[in-house]
Image (cartoon, rainbow, N blue to C red):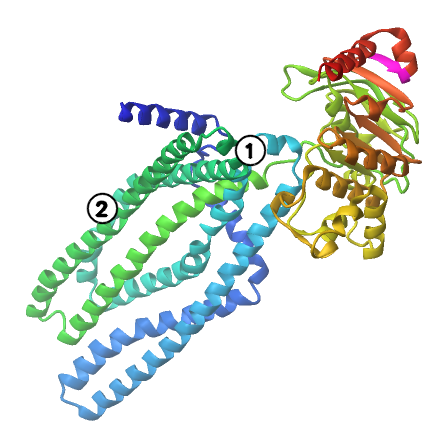
Amino acid sequence: MMRANQKNLNSKVMERFHYSADRIIDKPFNWKQMARLLQYLKPYRKTLLPKAFTAVLIKTLITLIIPMLIGVYAIGKGVTEKNGKFLFEMVFLIAVLYIAAYISNIFRIRWINQLGQNIIYDIRKKLFTHVQQLSHHFFEQRSAGSILVRIMNDTNSLQDLFTNGVINSLMDMLMLAGIIVILFTLSPPLTLAILVIMPIMFFISTKLRRKIRRAWQMMRLRQSTLNSHLNESIQGIRVTQSFTQEKENMAFFDGVNTANFEAWRTASRRSAVFRPVIDLTNAVGSAVLIWYGAHLIGAGKLSIGAFVSFAFYVGMFWQPISRLGQVYNQLLQAMASSERIFEYLDEKPSVSDGKHAVRLSNIKGHIEFDHVEFSYDKKRKALNGVSLDILPGETVALVGHTGSGKTTIANLISRFYDATGGVVRIDGYDVKDIALKNLRSQISVVLQDTFIFSGTIMENIKFGSPEASDEEAVEAAKITGADHFIRKLKAGYDTEVEERGNILSVGERQLLSFARTILADPKIIILDEATASIDTETELRIQKALKTLLKGRTSIIIAHRLSTIRDADKIFVLDHGSLLEAGTHAQLMARRGEYYRLIKAQFKMLESV
């Protein structure tokens, strides 16, 4: 029974994997992708890159010289010819070269690590910067955990490639080329006999390539889902505990964790095949060396000293091949991660500045909706030919049932989305023609669920206006009434708030949000159910603050409470994306239409409490 339950659970996990925005990006391996990744080396081509390359070159040349000195000269002339003085000179020279190789290796490791860390820093910075520019549509399709994996884990997986892969691969290729040249110099027949097994190794590795790459992609996908579930579980821990779903949540996590483990094990198992292939090739090569080398020495076609050097070089020959095999595994992992990173970097914002976007230095706040249509999913319309006119300095309220289009109107004004039909204008300009940052810098949105960042109270108030003085921030807090509770905190305005402001009540977080808005001094204010979660006493403070906050500004209030909308200059009544009524509170009540029914229903609900 337990196994059947676990099987069903794993099936649910697989469904979530299948329908997730994260997926296996099945593109053929190509060097254009790799060349794009290597573009991040460009900023260091005149600094760290030449230093690292020089250290690699010195280390490679010394490594290639030493076996020749040992076999052909030290043994071939010093030992065979019993020349003690020459042997001593060779030993001394070899010792000096080993020391030089040791020193160059220290600098090689230091400079390569610096290069790798700098590149990872650049990639992560670019990715985070780009993600911040993407539109709301992007974040609605992806979980926070999935995005976190791209920025952290996928960039980290590139670290080995840049710290141990790129430069070291260059060293290994130089080493391999040098060894082959020297081997042919020492004995062409013996070299050809050993290299004949190379095509077999390349054939096997080619067959394994696609399977290994897909396995690492699957591992990244499973890791993304694991992180996504962890983030969701931590954020929703209170709901989980409230409904006593800890056991079920743990069972689901076990399914996600098991899938992640199995994907990692599959990828590791396939990658592990590479090393044994190299080792097998090495063993076969060593057997050929001993058998055919002994034959050539017996035939007088190869000296003992040359054979010793040849044996050294053959031993060295398999080392770079083995390391290149490991780098190839790193490359496959890096390609899987880089494809996921570049997928985000190639993502274009659905909302962006036009070629001739204008900057409005001082928005007056005249808002027009001209037969505006909008759909989130291109199927169901959230707005259906809505036309409305909000004059500068007016306070208007948007009223309607859930899903009527109130928040959609607010989103289009802030240009979080672009209308799919009709035109949204501010001060006569199509919002699509106004520079995005310029537009949003003069609009403030206060939501029902206020987001408080980790940091101090003062830093949160000044979030939208970091250049403001502490005195101005305190004055903004006094206007909203936030100063009242801030002064009671142990450290006052220097109090550190936890993630999402959990040490503060809902009302206190909302007061901070209003203080933040007042300090930003916007020309247009949007209150999206901003007082819905506030108690009556706090709302009275907010209502008092609103008189100062809304004065001289165009204000859009989305609310259900009569106290927050009855004094509005205009009230727009929406239903299923259409505008039903418009007028003042008194006009709409006298009309006895949809607004009248909404207000009556609210009064009946209050009377029944």
Q: In the rendered image, which residue does mark 1 sit on?
A: 142
Residue 200's label in the rendered image is: 2
Crowding at dot 1, Cα within 10 Å, few <14 / some 14-19 / many 20+, comes out as: some
**Separation of marks 1 and 2 at Cα, in angstroms:** 44 Å
Q: At which x and y percent is residue 45? A: 55, 62
Range of the magenta residues? Answer: 580-585
Q: At which x and y percent is residue 193? A: 17, 56
Q: Considering only vertical position in the picture, is 172 above or below 342?
A: below
Q: Is residue 471 left or right of residue 200?
A: right
Say what amino acid the circle numbered 1 marks. Arg
Which residue is drawn at the image coordinates 90% and 38% (left, top)?
548
Secondary structure beneath label 2:
helix
Q: At which x and y percent is residue 502? A: 62, 43
| In the image, residue 165 lies in the stretch drawn in magenta | no
Say what amino acid the circle numbered 2 marks. Ile
Q: Quadrant of the N terminus?
A: top left
Crowding at dot 2, Cα within 10 Å, few <14 / some 14-19 / many 20+, comes out as: few
Which residue is drawn at the image coordinates 72% and 37% (left, top)?
507
Comparing 548 with 482, the one in front is 482
Q: Quadrant of the C terminus?
A: top right
User: Is any atom of residue 356 visible in this view?
Assistant: no
Q: Tell me the mark number nearer the camera, choosing from 1 and 2.
A: 1
**Tag count in the figure?**
2
Q: Considering only vertical position in the picture, is 487 above or below 446?
A: below
Comparing 488 with 96, the one in front is 488
Q: Earlier in the sequence, mark 1 or mark 2?
A: 1
Q: Considering only vertical position in the picture, is 194 above or below 576?
A: below
Secondary structure beneath label 1:
loop
Classified by dominant secondary structure, the portion drawn in magenta counts as strand
The quadrant in which residue 448 appears is top right
The quadrant in which residue 396 appears is top right
Q: Is residue 311 left or right of residue 455?
A: left
